[in-house]
Image: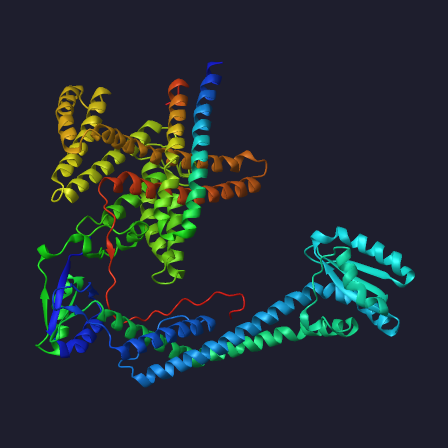
Amino acid sequence: MNMMWIVLSAAGVMSVAALATAWAQSKIGSAGAAALAEKPELAGTIIVLVAIPETMVILGFIVAVLILLRAGGGA
Amino acid sequence: MIIPMARVRVLGPRDRFDDALQAVQDFGQLQLAEARSRAGVQSAHLDPRAERRRAQLMRALDETDEALRALAVAGTGPAQRNATVQDFARWARLANHTAREARALRSRETALDEERALVTRYRDFLSAVLPAVRRVADTPRLTSHAVVVPESGRATVDTLAKALRDQLGAEFSMTTRELAGGDLAILLVLPREFSAKLDARLAEARVPEVPLPAAYRDMPLEQAVPRMLARLVDIPAEVEACRAERREMARARGPELRAARAAIEDWLAAASAHEHTAVTPHAFAIEGWLPERSVPGLTRRISAAVGPTVVVETVAREDWGAQDAPVVLSNPRLFRPFEAVIGLLPLPRYGTIDPTPFVAVFFPLMFGMMLGDAGYGVLLAGLALLVHARARPGSLLQTAARIAGPCAAFTIIFGVLYGEYFGDLGLRLFGLHPIIFDRERAVFAALAAAVGLGVVHVVLGLVLGAITSYRKEPKHALGSGVSALMVLLVVAALLAAFEVLPSRLFTPAVVVLLIAFPVLVFAEGLIAPVELLATLGNVLSYARIMAIGTASVMLAVVANQMAGAVGSTVVGLVFALLFHLVNFAIGVFSPAIHAFRLHYVEFFGKFYSPGGQPYTPFGHRFAPPAPETSRTSS
């Protein structure tokens, strides 16, 4: 039972972080694509802007791994 | 690095102005600066005759561009030196009639393509109805009409058929056939006397009609159909004839047009240089920027070409601002491809730091830490070599291949350190163990290594920020330095708290932090604590190196497990290979994007000052316009 909650918690963290990142990237990506069509020289800035929300899913992944390893008794 | 620039002034008597300008253009390294307006000094405007010639040459340039595009002529050609007025007139005529002829040929090709597309659209229908059309032609009372109805108007056809059948009875017949794309082709057979009313009937029934090609519209169908089918055989040869004519024109006139373009561009560049030059009734002054190391070369060139009456003097550094100087990046050959990474952002300001050398070290390092698999590294190296060999010299693809080389080297190094050879294949087949840690299991060690690299990178960024701003903004420089120190102290305190470092270091680290805090607030203001927290967040952001690396190794391990998981060994191997291929593709793309991001956001944010002016020296221009890409271009 405990293990189930641990796994569910890790999955929950990962899912919420991934959904949040996806939502943010969809907004930034569509606006970025529109901006790129008019100003291709903004490519660098737009890559950065699109990549910024990925921090959320990466931190989510790390928290999920920590939950699994710490609470689940891993290494 | 950003190479040191010098601002120079070329001074001389007015009657040597043209020769001096020519010498500067031949030297090709001076970026002209605006002429300074002072009493008695004005810009060297062109005389009315030269202005007229400029207008004519601009038109000629447009026509040359059009002709080169239409003839799909690419490449570069040297400009003819000392072109005369007669040369320019000949080139203008050549460009004019070549552009006209090329335009006519392209229009003809386009018309033929459209005709072919239209007839092709009708072909199946026409072939099918040709016997019926011929039969109708033998019956004097009847006539036939072909109508094509778009897909959206198909519903109206039944209404039309019903109305015509009611009115004409047995003398009316209709054959339909669906064309590619969903349109409906209809052959209507009806009494000849009713033919004139057909258009009205079509309009009444609201049948949207796609017209027959204009050339056949007024022709009886029994004549039009065979002619249209015959055209399908003739058109390709006619298109090829047009293309051959264009190719021949490009071969015969292309080189001269390219040379003409270069010469016209040269003349126009020299003409616009006049506006940058200050003159008095007796003297002239050309001012501009060039790399400091090129000043002696310019002096020698001017002296040799114009004589000792024209001199080159260097403007004192105090008399010009860094914001006006153009920026030229100059890096060792190994680092140069990484200038492309900087190229995605605006140039750094003159007098600041060129981050290329740091990117050249940290970008492949981070990439290697993330991908970290000797097998994938070898694959990437092979791919980079292949692309480098195939890509056009100087192209973006070749630059990418040059960046991929060091990335592959670091990937192999980290792969050996992590003991990863296509995931755990090295361990399974050859017993190759990790040298530092196993990323599959030692997640905390990987996390510590990633964040450790983050500390080094962010602190380096802060130190570079302090160096950049210490002259003009000493307080900001102090703030950057104190931030760097505080990041290190926070890390030291945390490590001491978790007894990674001796725990006795904890108290001194905290005490120094408490002392540094007011200094930071003094230097950067009340926003400083928030910025410090953001900087610590930046450090944590490097955890992505571990996250992406772990994901990559897990996928590789899963790929290896596939080989034994499926019943058939061969199918399992195919699956494993495919999975490795997908993982490799993700493994190349994702670390590259994240290494970019870590540089752009976390690292550059600490010191990078964008806003540099690009260096555009006044010289001879050779590059013709890119050829038009067109379906019909050969």
Q: Is residue B367 left or right of residue B423?
A: left
Q: Position of residue B223 (x, y in %)?
A: 77, 75
Outermost residue, bottom direction?
B86
Outermost residue, right direction?
B170
Q: Position of residue B444 (x, y in %)?
A: 33, 27
Q: Position of residue B254 (x, y in %)?
A: 42, 77
In-front residue for pair B419/B51: B51
Relative to B550, say whether B155 is above or below. Answer: below
In-front residue for pair B3/B531: B531
Colour logic: rainbow
Number of numbered callouts drawn: 0
Outermost residue, top direction?
A1
Q: Position of residue B583 (x, y in %)?
A: 45, 41
Q: Name the image quarter holding residue B137.
A: bottom right
In-front residue for pair B215/B590: B215
Q: Is residue B76 left or right of residue B175?
A: left
Q: Is residue B78 visible?
A: no
Q: Residue at x 34, y 74 (%)?
A: B55
Q: Residue at x 33, y 84 (%)?
A: B87
Q: Name the image quarter holding residue B200.
A: bottom right
Relative to B141, say whether B418 is above or below. Answer: above
Q: Is residue B624 left or right of residue B108?
A: left
Q: Residue at x 37, y 20 (%)?
A: A70
In-front residue for pair A41/B169: B169
Q: Is residue B285 visible?
A: yes
Outermost residue, front direction?
B39
Relative to B532, say whether B627 is above or below. Answer: below
